[in-house]
Amino acid sequence: MDWSALTLSLELAAWTTAILMPIGVAIGRTLARRQFVAKSIVEALIALPLVLPPTVLGFYLLVAFGGASPLGQFYETLIGRPLVFSFQGLLLASLIFNLPFAVQPVQRAFEALPRDIREAAWCCGMSPWRTFRSIEFPLVWTGVLSAMVLTFAHTLGEFGVVLMVGGNIPGETQTIAISIYDRVQALQDQQAALMSAILLVFSFATISVIYIINNRTRRHREY
Amino acid sequence: MNTNNTGGLHVHLKQVAPIYLDAQFQCATGELIVLVGPSGSGKSTILRCIAGLTMPKKGLVRFNETAWLDTDLGIHCPPQKRSVGMVFQHYALFPHLSALDNITVVLGEASRTRREQRARELLAFVNLQGLESRHPSELSGGQQQRVALARSLARDPDVLLLDEPFSAVDQITRRKLQLELARLRQQLKMPIVLVTHDLDEACILADRMCVLHHGRSLQAGPPAKVMSRPDSDLVARLVGLTNLFAGEVIDHKSAPQITLLRWANHTLECRHRPDIRPGQTVSWIIPPQQVILHRRGRPSRGERENPVDGVIRDLVVLGGDVSITMSVNDNPDLPLSLTLSSHVAHRNHLAVGEHITVSLLAHGVHLMPEQT
């Protein structure tokens, strides 16, 4: 059992979720509310990681983070280490390929909120912030929770992008999914089976929690 | 934009797009004005402009001395800064909160006990004691509407806005809620603006009604006046008046004071309207109740007053009354309606195809100059 790979995966998933949630709520809410010219393009860009082969996305990220790119150079002068094949580079890639998982459930939840509910709050004198905190957020929190769980679980399981951008450095960029692949290559089937089972149980448990919560709130709530 | 400087709510809105608006009305403190018009007439948009939820291109919304909106001066207060209470068409209750918390949540930063006490008072005001802990999904339509009303009063608004508040409940509940509003409003010392497409509702509740069409306010006045003396044939049509015809004013008489009107081959005596010059074409109406049947075979004195004859085309019994449509001069393009008690219809052996003569009472004929 490769505990360091599991810890690294959990760390990556936790950071990704923590950083991405406020961004996902902000983007999801904006997309649900506003109409603007390039909206379809923006939505398509956010959804792109769902359909793009992870190796393709990983390739472009590798190029974008590499020493030849402005971003890679800037990071290297600032920190003194290359961005690629580092935990930070992996985290940045993870933030990008998880965008659709963080944004879409939140956007759907905000779209399901009737406009007149927040307008009623304003007409009662509630500020936009208080309206968000006391009215909107309690009504969309299941969407936010879905986004969190999906982002976390998806980060744990991502393989292609991680391999392209992070490589396979134990303790730095070797996640559990890559470690499983390594074990299979090394004919250590039993270890691979154990780690796979852990991922399977974890994924199933988290997804079940989402469905249970969604079904329970839906029963109580009609607009 | 100018409106005179008396108190209450003043509204004057003008825009071309996205929805045409040219509306102007006032509502005094304690007065209930009903904006009535078909769907798409802009009534809800006007209400949203008053609440600050929609920004018109040009407009003035003022309560007493305070401008909430004045596009000339660049004033546009957000809804939070306007002291309005608004009841939405579908109530817009907060579905995750109990009836009580729907109100406490909007009561700001006071202590929990104070807010709860105030919320209980408001729910008692709308007769909802005992249902404080119910969630909106556990309340009937009528109860939801009352919570919405109580919530709209929570901030002690200066103006109350009601957007089709009775449209989402069944008819029996609607009557009950209308009665209740009529009772509650005596304690609400504020201008109340109610939007509806239901004319009966407007007539029951309104101190004054304002008829809207395609965003334009056509006429404002007490319901009885608007219904009997519409300013134009368009208003007459919008409030559903029958017996609307076109004619030409030919002369005014001074003793007795009457105006003479040419209509088909008849010369009708009408209520005196010296403001309309002879030769002008006008629209005119007469209420069905002011069309009097001549008793057949037994002439009487009243028959000299605008006698008109024709053939009965349609006869419908409605409760104790009979509604008759006759073709004047046997011309199907001149349908004249009158209402009689069913026993009168029976005694006179009225039936479809029968020939009858009626009098149009002169004081009931209302002339409307063509709009320029």
Image (cartoon, grey):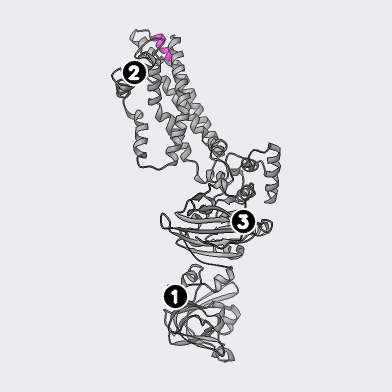
Residue A113 coordinates in the image, percent (x, y): 50, 41
Residue at (60, 56) in percent of width and height: B64
Q: Amino acid at mark 3?
A: Thr
- Distance Cα–Cα, label 1 vs label 2: 79 Å
Mark linked to residue B173? 3
Does the segment drawn in magenta span residue A193?
Answer: yes
Q: Which mark is drawn over residue B370?
A: 1
Looking at the image, residue B27 lies above or below residue B142: below
SS at circle 2: helix
- Residue at image position (34%, 33%) is A45
Q: Position of residue B125 (x, y in %)?
A: 69, 51
Q: Which of the marked residues, 3 or 1, is nearer the chain's N terminus?
A: 3
In the drawing, what numbered circle is on residue A165?
A: 2
Q: Amino acid at mark 1?
A: Glu
Chain of the residue where label 3 is placed in the rendered structure: B
Asked where in the image residue B167 lies, by quadrant, the reply is: bottom right
Magenta segment: A187-195
User: As rendered, which of B286 and A31 lies closer to the eye?
Assistant: A31
Residue A94: image quadrant is top left
Q: CA distance from mark 2 to mark 3?
A: 66 Å
**Residue B122 against residue A132 in the figure, above or below:** below
Horizontal placement of B10 versus A201: left or right? right
Is the C-beta separation of discs 2 and 3 under 8 Å? Answer: no
Chain of the residue displaying label 2: A
Q: Position of residue B307 (x, y in %)?
A: 51, 88
Nearer to us in this view, B114 or B313: B114
Contact (CB < 8 A) between labels 3 and 1?
no
